Image (cartoon, rainbow, N blue to C red):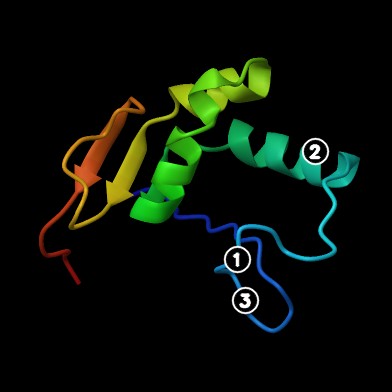
Amino acid sequence: MRKLIITEFISVDGIAEVEKLPGVTWNDEMNAFKEDELADSGAMLLGRTTYEIFAGSWPSETGDFADRFNALPKYVASTSLKALDWQPAELVAGPLPE
């Protein structure tokens, strides 16, 4: 069984549902963290909303980071999505084991 590593951009008061967090500026330290994280990743586990946001922008991005990000297998948890255009991707549906 593989490890599940969760990275979230979240405010101090726990808000993670806005598209942009106030005061968050992408910098070299964050870039290095995400590059290291991506290098150690074997797949992505995404919810429907995140998958749709990423699928709307990442396929057109270029460069080493984007190439790796786009190539990773994506497991998408959703009960409403029927098609996954951003590949490689697999729909995770139905009851999950406890």
At mark 3, the secondary structure is: loop
**Quadrant that contains the C terminus:** bottom left
For residue 15, side relative to residue 69 (left or right): right
Residue furthest out toward the bottom: 13
Give the residue type that dot 2 points to: Ala
Q: Nearer the viewer, mark 1 or mark 3?
A: 1
At mark 1, the secondary structure is: loop
Disc 2 to disc 3: CB gap under 8 Å? no
Disc 2 to disc 1: CB gap under 8 Å? no
Q: Position of residue 17 (x, y in %)?
A: 55, 68
Q: Nearer the viewer, mark 2 or mark 1?
A: 1
Residue 15, numbered label = 3
For residue 13, side relative to residue 27 (left or right): left
Q: Report crowding for label 3: few under 14, some 14 to 19, many 20 or more residues within 10 A (C-alpha).
A: few
Residue 42 visible in the shown view:
no
Taking depth in this image into account, of 88 and 21 the one nearest to the observer is 21
At mark 2, the secondary structure is: helix
Q: Which residue is mark 1?
A: 18
Identify which residue is drawn at 21% across, 43% down. Answer: 91
Identify which residue is drawn at 30% across, 28% down. Answer: 85
For residue 43, side relative to residue 23 (left or right): left
Give the residue type that dot 3 points to: Ile
